[in-house]
Amino acid sequence: MKTAFITGITGQDGAYLAKLLLDKGYKVVGANPRRSSNGANFWRLNWLGITDQVTLEDCDLVDLSSLIRILTKHQPDEIYNLAAQSFVQTSWAQPLLTGQVTGLGAANVLEAMRLVSPNARLYQASTSEMYGLIQEPMQSEATPFYPRSPYAVAKLYAHWMTVNYRESFNLYACSGILFNHESPLRGLEFVTRKVTDAVARIKLGLQNELRLGNIDAKRDWGHAQDYVKAMWLMLQQDTPDDFVIATGRTTTVRDMCKIAFEHVGLNMDDYVTIDPEFFRPAEVDVLLGNPAKAQEKLGWSATTTLEEMIVEMVEADLKQLSSQ
Ligand code: NDP
Ligand code: GDP
């Protein structure tokens, strides 16, 4: 039985990845950063019904000793570093924390691996935000980076540290450059889930307005359940490498929003208000990924359309709110 260690197991991707690995017969160990609201951060693991099937260890990414302790105890075959301060907007309010967790935290994971588990395989959760002010209309592994937020700068450091540790110490370390991916388990602060939750509330008469920022921004949105499969595939290859994971289609926030409202028979223009509070100091106007390398080398491609995913999310929010 293989053992996997997942940081960020209580997040969207961590929960889906834990489920995928449990289904494959792995023993799954997860990092549990202590929160005062004991257990409230397990809602995604509970949703998937797997809380009792994973081994949770107290662990904060900024505490190298906690990582060393866990790797020594469990000797994982695979390490997935998904933990991060992951919300772009918050990274301007907490730039140093974002640097410590999202940037230096990844260096801590690499150091712990180098010292304790050099034969393990590591996945680092990199992001399309690193392309920021895009240098090519379609972004691939060869496209230069131009980060536009403290979050993206921190992730770029983590990305290059992953590449550097692979080249310096011959570690099996991969950086997955994932474009936006969503699901019913997405945090409510991200625009897709904010929209699907609001649409459900409006439909149920619980809310009558949705305040958004820049709805002209374009993103390449895929489904998190598809994307965690790519993470696992990256660690099953003969040699470690970096991969873009994307759908190859980009859509405005406006059009994504329209899909959600139309699904419940409403017109978004009757409910959406533009609010400067949600504009960012520097915006990433458009992202569009080229997944050709992942298709060719991993045999991976996205299987869920944006329309299918948004409908799934609206339905999940309707169900959840109706049952409350
Ligand atoms: P989430 O925000 O849902 O999850 C983040 C996870 O990190 C949570 O489990 C959180 O714990 C944990 N965490 C935060 N701070 C710490 C810390 N100091 N020590 C230990 N754990 C911590 O993110 P996603 O699941 O959406 O994304 C997974 C990873 O992929 C992230 O690194 C993200 O930046 C990256 N990414 C995501 C994309 C997306 O579209 N979803 C796109 C590209 C990259 P808790 O829940 O207890 O707060
Ligand atoms: P990001 O790509 O990681 O920043 O993911 P988000 O879901 O947070 O944002 C995607 C895009 O939606 C960005 O260009 C935001 O500026 C835009 N956007 C517009 N209105 C909102 C909003 O109200 N909340 C969020 N989170 N994003 C918004």
Image (spheres, rainbow, N blue to C red):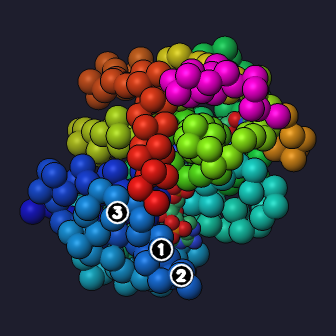
Q: Position of residue 282 (x, y in %)?
A: 85, 39
Q: To which residue does mark 1 refer?
A: 40
- Tell me the kind of residue under disc 1: Ala
- For label 1, the crowd category at 10 Å Cα-Cα, with few meaning under 14, some 14 to 19 and many 20 or more, is few
Q: Secondary structure at mark 2?
A: loop
- For label 2, the crowd category at 10 Å Cα-Cα, with few meaning under 14, some 14 to 19 and many 20 or more, is few
Q: Secondary structure at mark 1?
A: helix
| 184 to 26, vertically: above or below | above
- Tell me the kind of residue under disc 2: Ser
Q: Is residue 95 magenta?
A: no
For residue 30, side relative to residue 37 (left or right):
left
Q: For residue 46, what is the image quadrant?
A: bottom left
Q: To which residue does mark 2 refer?
A: 37
Q: To which residue does mark 3 refer?
A: 45
Q: Magenta stretch?
A: 255-273
Q: Mark 3 touching mark 1, by CB under 8 A?
A: no
Q: Which residue occupies 53% across, 27% down? A: 264
Instruction: Report if residue 139 is visible in the image.
Output: no
Q: CA distance from mark 3 to mark 1?
A: 10 Å
Name the quadrant of the N terminus. bottom left
- Tell me the kind of residue under disc 3: Leu
The number of discs equals 3
Of mark 2 and mark 3, the one earlier in the sequence is: 2
Q: Mark 2 touching mark 1, by CB under 8 A?
A: yes
Q: Nearer the viewer, residue 59 or 109?
A: 59
Q: Nearer the viewer, residue 87 or 184?
A: 184
Q: Is residue 262 magenta?
A: yes
Q: Position of residue 79 (x, y in %)?
A: 34, 60
Q: Secondary structure at mark 3?
A: helix
Q: CA distance from mark 2 to mark 3?
A: 16 Å
